C-alpha cells in the first residue's frame, strides 16, 4: 500500500491549478444515463471516485473512454444500456453510486441499487431519495440489502425534504427531468454542484428553474439528448490548497477556482488574519506568522462546508487562543482528531463540538487516514509539523484529490509518496 511522507516546515510558494470538481463530476457522469448516445465531458478530475463511477456505468453497459495523461476529457456512450443494477461491491466503495438510481428509474423504468449503509463519517441514510421517488409514483422495495424502484413513467410531485441533502436533491432533479408533469423540490440543497447539474440537465433539454435556491421547479420532458460540457472547479480542493498556503505562512495563487463558491471559507480564512485577495485568475493567500482563533459551524451551502472542517482544524491548532468547531452535518466526522492529538494538538471533543486550543507545536508521527477529508487534514498537519509525518492508507486521499501530494511538492513542500505500511 502507498503512503505519503512529509518533512514539515516548508513555506509554500507559487501557483497551483484547481482540478475539476469531484462532487459535480459524479452526478454529471450519472446523468448521461438519461440520454441515449455519446456525451463528452471536459475537466473531469482523474480520481478514485470518478474511476469507480466509470466502472459502475460500464457495468450498466455504457462505454467510457478517457483521454490519456489526465487531460480530463471523458466520453460516455449510453447507446447500449443492458443492466439496471448498482451492485454492493461498487456502492460499498463509493456511496455516491446511489446517484444512478434517479436516472435509471426515470429513463428505464427500473433500478436496483445496493443500500449504501453507514460509512466512516456517519449513518448517511437515503430515506429522502426514496421518499421523493415514491411521491413520484415509483414502487419501492427493500430486500436483501438492495432497494428496487419501479415505475412505468414517473409523474411530477411536490416534494419537501426533511433534511437538506445534496445527492438526494440531485437524484430527484434527474428523476423529475423525465417525469410527466411538474416536480417541485422544497428545502433543496443549494450547493454549487446542484446548480451545475441543473445546468447540465438543461443543456440536455430539461426544464429546470431555481437550482441554487431552496425551491427547484422541474417541468418534465419526454426526452433528453447527449451534450458536451466542461465541469466546474473543485471548491473543496481549492479550499484545501488555500489552507495549506495559510498555515505554512506561504504565498500562493490558487488558480482556476470560483471565489463565489468559497465565500464562507474565504471569510473564515480572513477572520484568522490570513491575507486573502481575489486576483484576475484566482485567489492569492499570504499566510501570517500569528493567526487568530475562529469559531465555525458546518452548514449546508452557502454556509461553511463540512468537507472543509477537518482542514480548518489544522489551521486552528496554529491560532493563538481557543477555536470552537461544530459539525452539524455528519455525526461522526472527527475521526482525524485522535491522529492530530498524537501529533501534539490540543483538541477536546464533546458530542459534535470540538474545542481547539492553540498554538500547538505539532510534531511528525505515523498516522492513519480514515476518510477523504481526514486524510487531507493529516497532509496539512504534516506540512507544519516538526520532523517527519508518514500518512498511511492514502487511497482515501486519492479517492477525491487529483495528486494533492504532487501539487504541494510543486509549491515547495517536502512531500513524497512511498510504498509500505498497512
Ligand atoms: N440524510 C438523511 N437522509 C437522506 C439523505 C441525507 O438523513 O436521505 C442526512 C445525512 O445522513 C447527513 C445529511 O443529511 O447527515 C446531509 O447529507 P447529504 O445527503 O447532503 O450528503 P451526500 O449527498 O451523501 C454530499 C457530498 C459529500 C458532502 C455532503 C454534504 C457528494 C458525492 N458527496 O454527500 O461529500 O460531505 O454532500 O455537503 O456530493 C466528500 O466529498 O468528502 C463528501 C463526503
Image (tube, rainbow, N blue to C red):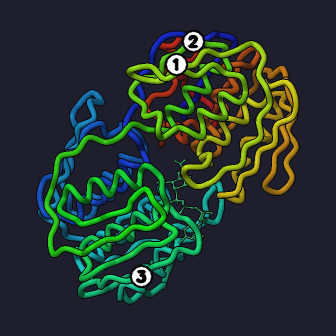
- Which quadrant, please, contains the N terminus? top right
Q: Which type of secondary structure does the marked residue at label 1 adopt? A: strand
Residue 20 appears left or right of 39: right
Depth check: give the residue in front, 38 or 367.
38
Label 2 beta carbon less than 8 Å to ligand 1: no
* N-term mark: 2 or 1: 2
Q: Is residue 39 above or below residue 403?
A: below
Q: Residue at x 13, y 63 (%)?
A: 36
Confirm whether residue 165 shows in the render: yes
Badge 1 is on which residue? 284
Q: Which type of secondary structure does the marked residue at label 2 adopt? A: strand
Residue 343 percent across, percent down from the top left: 80, 28
| Mark 3 surroundings within 10 Å by alpha-carbon count, few (fewer than 14), some (14 through 19), many (20 or more) | some
| Mark 2 surroundings within 10 Å by alpha-carbon count, few (fewer than 14), some (14 through 19), many (20 or more) | many
Residue 273 percent across, percent down from the top left: 71, 22
Badge 3 is on which residue? 158
Picture quadrant where residue 346 is located:
top right
Residue 85 appears left or right of 387: left
* N-term mark: 3 or 1: 3
- Which quadrant, please, contains the C terminus? top right
Residue 369 percent across, percent down from the top left: 64, 39
Depth check: give the residue in front, 279 or 404.
279
Q: In front: mark 2 or mark 1?
A: 1
User: Residue 12: which disc?
Assistant: none
Badge 2 is on which residue? 251
| Mark 1 surroundings within 10 Å by alpha-carbon count, few (fewer than 14), some (14 through 19), many (20 or more) | many
Q: Residue at x 57, y 19 (%)?
A: 285
Amino acid at each position: 500500500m502507498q503512503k505519503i511522507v512529509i518533512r514539515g516546515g516548508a513555506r509554500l510558494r507559487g501557483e497551483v491549478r484547481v482540478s475539476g470538481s469531484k462532487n459535480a463530476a459524479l452526478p454529471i457522469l450519472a446523468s448521461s444515463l438519461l440520454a441515449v448516445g455519446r456525451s463528452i465531458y471536459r475537466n473531469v478530475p482523474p480520481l478514485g471516485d470518478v474511476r469507480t463511477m466509470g466502472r459502475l456505468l460500464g457495468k450498466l453497459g455504457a462505454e467510457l473512454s478517457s483521454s490519456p495523461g489526465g487531460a480530463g476529457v471523458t466520453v460516455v456512450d449510453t447507446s447500449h444500456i443492458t443492466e439496471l443494477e448498482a451492485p454492493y461491491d461498487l456502492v460499498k466503495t463509493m456511496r455516491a453510486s446511489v446517484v444512478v438510481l434517479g436516472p435509471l428509474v426515470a429513463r428505464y423504468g427500473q433500478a436496483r441499487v445496493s443500500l449504501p449503509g453507514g460509512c466512516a463519517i456517519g449513518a448517511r441514510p437515503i430515506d429522502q431519495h426514496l421518499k421523493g421517488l415514491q411521491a413520484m409514483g415509483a414502487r419501492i422495495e427493500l430486500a436483501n440489502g438492495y432497494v428496487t424502484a419501479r415505475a412505468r413513467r414517473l409523474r411530477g410531485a411536490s416534494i419537501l425534504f426533511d433534511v437538506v441533502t445534496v445527492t438526494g436533491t440531485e437524484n430527484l432533479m434527474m428523476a423529475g427531468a423525465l417525469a410527466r408533469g411538474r416536480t417541485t423540490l422544497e428545502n433543496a440543497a443549494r450547493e454549487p454542484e446542484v446548480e451545475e447539474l441543473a445546468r447540465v440537465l438543461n443543456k440536455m433539454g430539461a426544464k429546470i428553474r431555481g437550482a441554487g435556491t431552496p425551491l427547484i421547479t422541474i417541468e418534465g420532458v419526454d426526452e433528453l439528448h447527449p451534450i458536451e460540457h466542461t465541469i466546474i472547479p473543485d471548491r473543496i480542493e481549492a479550499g484545501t490548497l488555500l489552507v495549506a498556503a495559510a498555515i505554512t505562512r506561504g504565498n500562493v495563487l490558487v488558480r482556476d477556482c470560483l471565489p463565489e463558491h468559497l465565500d464562507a471559507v474565504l471569510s473564515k480564512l480572513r477572520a484568522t488574519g490570513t491575507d486573502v485577495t481575489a486576483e484576475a485568475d484566482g485567489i492569492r493567500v499570504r499566510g501570517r506568522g500569528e493567526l487568530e482563533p475562529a469559531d465555525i459551524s458546518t452548514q449546508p451551502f452557502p454556509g461553511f462546508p463540512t468537507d472543509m472542517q477537518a482542514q480548518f482544524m489544522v489551521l486552528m491548532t496554529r491560532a493563538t487562543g481557543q477555536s470552537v468547531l461544530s459539525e452539524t452535518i455528519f455525526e461522526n466526522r472527527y475521526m482525524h482528531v485522535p491522529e492530530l492529538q498524537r501529533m501534539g494538538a490540543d483538541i477536546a471533543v464533546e458530542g459534535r463540538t470540538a474545542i481547539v486550543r492553540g498554538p500547538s507545536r505539532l510534531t511528525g508521527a505515523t498516522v492513519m487516514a480514515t476518510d477523504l477529508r481526514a486524510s487531507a487534514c493529516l497532509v496539512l498537519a504534516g506540512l507544519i509539523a516538526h520532523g517527519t509525518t508518514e500518512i498511511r492508507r492514502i487511497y482515501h486521499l486519492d479517492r477525491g484529490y487529483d495528486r494533492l501530494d504532487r501539487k504541494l511538492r510543486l509549491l515547495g513542500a517536502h512531500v513524497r509518496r512511498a510504498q509500505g505500511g498497512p
